[in-house]
Image: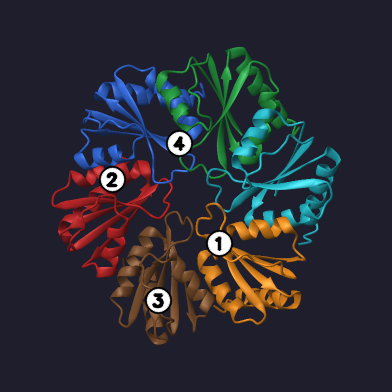
Chain colours: A red, B blue, C green, D cyan, E brown, F orange
Amino acid sequence: MDCRIIKSPGENTMAILNRRKSSKEKLDKPDAIGLVQGKLIEMICATDVAEKAVGVTIEDIRGSCPQNMILLAIFGDTASVVAAIEEIKRREKNNEW
Amino acid sequence: MDCRIIKSPGENTMAILNRRKSSKEKLDKPDAIGLVQGKLIEMICATDVAEKAVGVTIEDIRGSCPQNMILLAIFGDTASVVAAIEEIKRREKNNEW
Amino acid sequence: MDCRIIKSPGENTMAILNRRKSSKEKLDKPDAIGLVQGKLIEMICATDVAEKAVGVTIEDIRGSCPQNMILLAIFGDTASVVAAIEEIKRREKNNEW
Amino acid sequence: MDCRIIKSPGENTMAILNRRKSSKEKLDKPDAIGLVQGKLIEMICATDVAEKAVGVTIEDIRGSCPQNMILLAIFGDTASVVAAIEEIKRREKNNEW
Amino acid sequence: MDCRIIKSPGENTMAILNRRKSSKEKLDKPDAIGLVQGKLIEMICATDVAEKAVGVTIEDIRGSCPQNMILLAIFGDTASVVAAIEEIKRREKNNEW
Amino acid sequence: MDCRIIKSPGENTMAILNRRKSSKEKLDKPDAIGLVQGKLIEMICATDVAEKAVGVTIEDIRGSCPQNMILLAIFGDTASVVAAIEEIKRREKNNEW
């Protein structure tokens, strides 16, 4: 799994995510975005970890034809996003799925 | 094949699975979800093993364009899901297909 | 090529195959199913071998987006399915295409 | 590139090819079928070699989602199909494109 | 990530980019185009870097079925495009995401 | 990148290219066709090189699902096509993009 954090995302970045997310509501610009990319089975486990964290919203993002890949986007204030990403990394490292 | 178990799945996790499953009925939140990812031929054999186990429901989950991949989701009480996943792993290890 | 045999297939297994096969008629549950997965060129040769065997019916199964892959499913009584799969393996081993 | 020849193709084999070819006319059963699988750029060169051979008809066959892959099917009497496949192999071996 | 710069792009080049970009407005020919290709997660981070640079416009370009790949096109005067590409390369090199 | 030249292309070869090109006009049979296959970012740079050459017409050709791949077809008299392909190869070799 590949994890990254964008602080104060710009408008084009939000536009690309809005164009490719599964849910319909337009997202407001958050303080930070956490991104997680991996195999479908990993993304579903990461989603479950992230949504048990506090203060974040989760979206799955499609590429144009992302095979068994989805990108998970975690929106929220910077501290919450960092905490959610850290927990996902910790679970992966310890193979705690 | 890659196998994982999610206990007490959250709402976003259920939403992602509901959005991508082949059958139409909305799934109720189960105690646990077993996930199995592999080649199409492996998934069909794993489906057959899982459905001969007791106390579980089976769904095949599509990625956006999962090539020859499908993800198998096994729903049920925790003990039944663990038993089904263990049987799939045992069959794969012993090449008993 | 990857070959497997499922004896007395369950209902979910039949449902997954019925959902993904190219022809329209719903298949009755056979005694056994032979599965063969490989490149498109290999599958077409395997189809030709299988249909010259006796007592089996053949279907090509799509994944959601199986690239150049199709899965060949061979339905029939157990002895006929085993014989067809053995002949496919023998031809592949001896490179008799 | 991967090349194979099927002699006296069966009905299922013809049905799979008929379902996946680009042109619309239904093909009659030929004496033999030559199959060539490779990258799109190779297939276009192989098409040009095959159509300058005598006594064969050419079709490009799609997989369900064959990426940059197409399968070339060469129909005709056995000697003509063998000659066309041999010429494609010779050109590839000598890198005469 | 793979980065390239085209100076004084020709009409066919603009036509290919116009045919494959996500937004609808036809682009005017810029002085230069910066191109960045990589994984979806990298492209989203690169978009965020590029749009915080000055004097450039950003488009995401689809291949026909680019899996988890998109191509980022950065339009503007030559100096601005070069500066945006340099900043993306610097961030990648220092792993400053 | 993979580059090839077809001299005096046959009708089937033209038909495959006509079926898969992005623009709508039917192409007349040229003296020669240059083919270039590579990653989307490479193809866009190659397009720009080719269209600054003289005496050639350019088309991008889709595979059935060519991921981030397109095939570039360069039509014209033999000398012009050879010159355009040589310039593309020279630029790639010297990394002059």
Q: The residue tagged with tag 3: helix, strand or loop?
A: loop
Amino acid type, label 1: Ile
The residues tagged by marks 2 and 3 sit, at their Cα atoms, a distance apart of 39 Å
* Image mark 3: chain: E
Q: Position of residue D70 (x, y in %)?
A: 62, 49
Q: Which residue is mark 1?
A: F70
The C terminus of chain A sits in image quarter: top left
Give the foreground label among 2 and 3: 3
Query: Are discs 1 and 3 less than 8 Å apart at CB?
Result: no
Give the foreground label among 4 and 3: 3
| Residue in front for this viewpoint, D73 or C82 | D73
* Image mark 2: chain: A
Q: Position of residue F86 (x, y in %)?
A: 69, 76
Q: Which residue is mark 4?
A: B38
Q: Which residue is mark 3?
A: E27
**In the rendered image, residues at marks 2 and 3 fall on the same chain:** no
